[in-house]
Image (tube, rainbow, N blue to C red):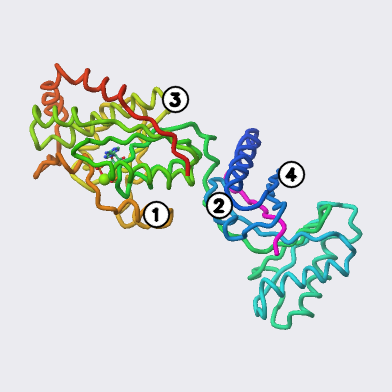
Amino acid sequence: MYQAFLIKYAEIGIKGKNRYIFEDALVEHIRRALKKVEGNFRVTKEQGRIYAFPEEAYDFEETVEALKRVFGIAAICPVVVTEDQGYEKLAEAVVGYVQKVYPASTRSFKVHARRARKSYPMDSMELNRELGGAILAACPGMRVDVHQPDIWLTVEVRQKIYIYSEEIPGPGGMPVGTNGSAMLLLSGGIDSPVAGYMIAKRGVKIDAVYFHAPPYTSDRAKQKVIDLARLVARYSGPIRLHIVNFTDIQLAIYEKCPHDELTIIMRRYMMKIAEKMAEEDGSLALITGESIGQVASQTVHSLACTNEVCTLPVFRPLIGFDKQEIVDISLKIGTYETSVLPYEDCCTIFVAKHPVTKPNLRTIRHSEEKLADVIDGLLDEAVQSAEVMEIEE
Ligand code: ATP
Ligand code: MG
């Protein structure tokens, strides 16, 4: 039934002189998203509006689902496009639209005519009045409300005539890549995929690093992280995933440092390695799924200790979220089911029974000195032996 989709964007609209950069990026992302669905689409930017026109048979649901994952889209409006064959035909098309989209409705409406083609013989006031009258005559249950209508029916006169009223919410945010790139520390849990999603939503291209500890962690655990990266990539676009073998570092820490400090020391080396990877990839920040107080390694004291090793900014978009709020987002974006698969994580294997919750930075540094002979070599080895994968949805 629909011959076009009008794409509304919110925040990009206010970017002043740079607006075209955001718009062009959004057009590119829409094109890419629609390449993956059945049928060919023409995507255009005209007069500050973005349209996607299907050029052959297409699947409506699949198309909308794809568009709902493109950051920068505030709303998707399915549009009926008709040829201009005079007012009578137009009134027929508008009434037909209302009867089909709102059958036997008793809701209120308002016609909002826009004349992009000024040579059209009726002006927008006349169109509003006449079309409103035609709808009232054909749909007896409906009424006009110009102040707070249930249905806001736009009739746009361009070369052809565009009729739409529905707005399907998009994901919001900004087009990926318009805001630099960052390195996500991606574990197999619930939180880090959500953290990556949230930063990508702000227009940041993301890459990822995963630390595993074979043979203590299995290939299935690694596959789970690859699967999660793929799910996040449905929104963020391609992710370069670095898989770092962390076993020797963990064993060295386990052997030489106090066990109640294992997690915190391990987290510090993870951040260090992630920062190295970020610098190599041209990423300007790190991203973690940490949330204050969630576990011993995420108390404010622990976060301060972990943060201390990095000079890049660390984005922690979930920092003030409760677990349930994070779960809700992971359900919404479709990562939850994969996240809860019960495979071991490198953090859980070497974890102490009673980890420190208020680590003292000086004590931690003192413990790390016991690794002085070996750690530089181990860090270099971990970085150099990392496996890199390009993950696409
Ligand atoms: P996650 O949410 O993703 O499961 P978590 O609740 O298990 O996190 P921690 O294990 O303390 O919490 O990890 C905190 C953060 O550190 C994670 O959100 C993630 O960003 C990073 N992280 C933890 N383990 C790994 C890992 N094996 N590889 C990469 N990053 C990790
Ligand atoms: Mg976890």
Judge the density around disc 3: few (<14), some (14-19), many (≥20) Cα neighbours within 10 Å. Answer: some
User: In the rendered structure, which disc, 1 or 2, sits on the residue that comes first in sequence?
Assistant: 2
Kind of residue at disc 3: Gly
**Taking 283 as reference, is 158 above or below it?**
below
Kind of residue at disc 2: Ala
Please give the range of residues in magenta: 1-11
Kind of residue at disc 4: Glu
Q: Residue 218 occupies which quadrant of the picture?
A: top left
Q: Which residue is labeled 3 in the image?
A: 282
Query: How far, Cα to Cα, is label 1 from label 2?
Result: 18 Å
Report x, y in % for residue 368: 14, 24
Q: Residue 387 occupies which quadrant of the picture?
A: top left
User: In the rendered structure, which disc, 4 or 2, sits on the residue that comes first in sequence?
Assistant: 4
User: In the rendered structure, which disc, 4 or 1, sits on the residue that comes first in sequence?
Assistant: 4
Q: Which residue is labeled 1 in the image?
A: 329
**Taking 63 as reference, is 46 above or below it?**
above
Query: How far, Cα to Cα, is label 4 from label 2?
Result: 22 Å
Q: Nearer the viewer, mark 3 or mark 2?
A: 2
The answer to whether mark 4 and mark 1 are in CB contact below 8 A is no
Q: Which residue is labeled 2 in the image?
A: 66
Kind of residue at disc 1: Ile
Disc 2, SS: helix
Q: Residue at x 64, y 40 (%)?
A: 23
Query: How far, Cα to Cα, is label 3 from label 2?
Result: 29 Å
Give the label on residue 46, or none. 4
User: In the rendered structure, which disc, 4 or 3, sits on the residue that comes first in sequence?
Assistant: 4
Disc 4, SS: strand
Query: How far, Cα to Cα, is label 4 from label 3?
Result: 34 Å
Residue 46 included in the magenta stretch of the image: no
Disc 1 CB within 8 Å of nearest ligand 1 atom: no
